[in-house]
Every structure is written in C-alpha cells, then in structure tokens.
Amino acid sequence: MSPLNTSERVRFFSEDRWTAGVVGLGYVGLPLLLTASESGLGAIGFDVSESLVESLGGGNSHIDDISDEQLRIGLDAGVEFSSDPSSLKGADAIFICVPSPLGRNREPDLSYIRSAAETVASVAQQGQLIVLESTTYPGTTEDYLVPALAEVGLELDSDVHIAFSPERVSPGDDMKTGEIPKVVGGVSDASGDVAEAVYRRLVPSVHRVSSARTAEMAKLLENTYRSVNIGLINEMAQLSHELGIDIWEVVDAAATKPFGYQPFYPGPGVGGHCIPLDPQFLAWRAREANFSTRFIDTAEQVNSKMPAYNVDRITRLLNGAGKPVFGTEILGVGIAYKRDIADDRESASLDVLAELRARGAIISVLDDTVGADRILSHGYEPASIDDLSRYTLAAVLTDHTDVDYARLAAEVPLVFDTRGVFRRLGIESESVVAL
Ligand SMILES: NC(=O)c1ccc[n+]([C@@H]2O[C@H](COP(=O)([O-])OP(=O)(O)OC[C@H]3O[C@@H](n4cnc5c(N)ncnc54)[C@H](O)[C@@H]3O)[C@@H](O)[C@H]2O)c1
C-alpha cells in the first residue's frame, strides 16, 4: 500500500462525491446520515440492531426529529441501511455515533465505543477518515480508535486519518444537524485537515481545533456549563421559595439584561442522557489526574436532589389541603426529559413519579408525545385530558405544548408546576402552585 497523500484526500473530500458511513443510527447518527445524503453525498448507515435496520429500510423513522417523509426522500436518493459491517468498506468517511453511557459507579462505559472501533477496524480501508462523534472523556479517540486501527495494520496518517467531532444535536428544536456549527479536531494535523474538509461538505460552519482532545473537552465544557448553571438556578429556586419570592419572575427580570446573562430554568431535576452524564466523564478523568472538580460535584449534588425536593413540595401542597400522599391519585403530566420530544431516557420527571409512588401515591401519566407504550413500561397508567376528575393533584413535570393547561388548572384541584408553564402561558389560577 502506498502512503496516504493528505492533500489529495483533502481535495477529494472537498470536491468529489464521496460516501459517508455512519455507525449507530440513533438520535445522532440518523440525522447525520440524512444530512450527508441531503448534501449530495453517498450514505451508508450501519447499526448492530437488525430490527432497526429493517424498519429504517422500510421507511419508518424512530427519531422525533426525522419524519418518515424525510427518511423516504433519503431512501429514494440512495441511502442504504445495513447490519453487515462490511457495508462500511464502501464508505470514504466513517462517523461513529454509538452510545457512551456511565457504568454502575458513574465511570464511563466505553464498551460501545470499543466495540464500534473494533468493528470499524475489521473492515477499514486505506484512505478512509474515521471520526468519533460520541461524547466521551478527553483522550478517547487516541486511546481507542488509533490502537484498534493499528492492530489491523492501519497506521495513523500513513493509512487512515482519525479525528473527533462532537455532536450538538438538540432534540425537539428547529435547528437541524446540517445547520449547527461543528468543532473538529484531528488526532494529528493531517487528520484534522482531512476531517475539516469532510465537515465543510456537511455543515455551514466548521471550527477547527488543534487536537481531538481539545474537541472532546469542548463538548464536555458545553454540557458542564449547562449542568452547572442548571444547578445554580435549581438552588436559587429553593432559596427563592424560602424567601417567598417567585423564581420565575426573577429569571424573567434578570433575562432582560442584554449582556452577561443567559437564562436557565429550574425544574424537576436535570434530565436527558447528556447533561446529567457528560460532566461525569470529566469528573472521572479528573479523579484519574488527582484533580477535584468542585463545580461539577456541587451541581450534581443540587441537581440530583431536585426530584426529592419537588416531591417534598408536592407533599406539603397536599398536606395543606389535608391530604396524604399515600393513596392519593396524582397525575404526572409529562415524562420526557424535555418539551415536545418522545425521549424519556434519564428523565428527572420519572424520578419524581417514582418517589411519589414509593410513598404510596397512585400515579397516572398524561404524555401523548411519549405515548402509552412507554408510560406502561414504567408501570403507570396512561391518562387522558378528558378524564381528570379522579385526580387530587397534577404535577407538571414536562411542559409539552400539546397539553391543555387551562383545562388542567380548571379541573384538577391542585396543580404543581415544575416548569413555569402556567406563568409563561398567562394562565392564572388559584389551584396552580409553581416550583
Ligand atoms: N441524543 C442527543 O441529544 C445527543 C446529543 C449530543 C451527543 N450525543 C451523544 O451521541 C452519542 C450517540 O447518542 P444517541 O442519542 O444517538 O444514541 P442512541 O441510543 O439513540 O443510538 C445509538 C445507536 O447505536 C447503535 N449501536 C450500539 N452499539 C453499536 C455498535 N457497536 N455498532 C453499531 N451500532 C451500534 C444502537 O443500536 C443505537 O441504534 C452518545 O455518545 C451521546 O452521548 C447525543
């Protein structure tokens, strides 16, 4: 094999029609695959789940932000789905978008990344660019991808290029993958040059950094910033309540400052499978370096106690009306971790409901976005907005836009609003108490 010519690869990725191979077709991978297709490139999607591959090939999207119609357009344009790793041999750039959860002791579970790296290495071809997009600790791309490829005889820069580019997809928001600027860092300068050329074909703006580690760290900074600020506002919410001040009014007031302030909002806790988890990658890496991450730890402590704090407030609200939690019918409104998405992974809303159930409340859930199957899978009865008379209290835990909040306020005697949605919608009611 002749050594790679980096400038030729940069020219190829900048000018020619090439093929993207995406490993892991979830919330991140599927939109990226379709973005490649929409950019006029070839697109091959690989996933270990045969049933997922079959259903995507049949035109059924499992991701909120991708409609069946968008998927159908992709299929008509030639997007391929496969559960056979050898399909990736036909790709010029391979993007790894597999899960990166935490293990039982909140240490990074890198088993998916390791397995995906081995799979890619087993089929990798000379000249390919391999990019990791999964969120992870700084150093992962060097620690996992480079050795996996070297193991099969493919050396960095002389045979393959290797880089990291964090995903910034925001489920449920209007901004799509192809519109969001990307941070890109290569394991080497040559790899960075090639990866930059690749992403310039996919997104309008690429911010090149000097290394894969920097790109990995940038992602963790973004999400740690969110976690710390949410921790701050969750603590401010508790303090404001003690002082008899409405936190929602306070945030709205502070947000009028045209510089130096970005509003964050309190809620049932911190949810989703990014914000609560990603700072832990950094904390874990810091422990290895004998460094203590005080901001991360404090935010984690405050945020992880928010579900219990909300349950306490709900308990007091019921007590005020002479009702116990035990045996009382409570309606949980929303179990997704975020408004208008169907994803309930790591949702703090579920933590609130689990604690209320543990205290003997009888829980039903209203969440048409997440749907009855998921609600039942958590052991709750799906509820209807047309049948509210049995509930003593409704806890608004996720502020989906399709809920008739005025009706909720009118028909349920007590409503606890963890999202400030009634204030936002201008619905005034004596039955509503906000966090
Ligand atoms: N969902 C988000 O909002 C979001 C945002 C930014 C970053 N991320 C990060 O992106 C990564 C992917 O997250 P996601 O939400 O898309 O996950 P997901 O669970 O929605 O999808 C992951 C897919 O990867 C597949 N998979 C697992 N192991 C595989 C392997 N070895 N080979 C091929 N396929 C494999 C799974 O079957 C699944 O379909 C994670 O690191 C996550 O932290 C997610």
Image (tube, helix red, strand yellow):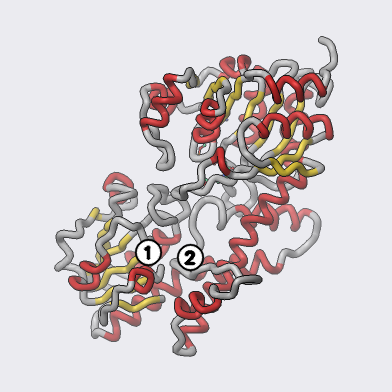
- Residue 418 placement (x, y as % from top left): 40, 70
Q: Is residue 308 above or below residue 131?
A: below
Foreground residue, 276 or 240?
A: 240
For label 1, being within 8 Å of ligand 1 is answered: no
Direction from residue 399 to residue 84 in the image, left or right: right
- Residue 29 placement (x, y as % from top left): 54, 34
State which quadrant residue 361 falls in: bottom left
Can residue 254 be seen in this snapshot? yes
State which quadrant residue 329 falls in: bottom left
- Residue at image location 82% in from the left, 25% down from the top: 157
Foreground residue, 26 or 93?
A: 93
Which quadrant contains ligand 1?
A: top right
Give the crowd class for mark 1: few <14, some 14-19, many >=20 residues within 10 Å.
Answer: many
Secondary structure at numbered mark 1: loop
Identify the residue under disc 1.
397
Can residue 51 be seen in this snapshot? no
State which quadrant residue 206 falls in: top right
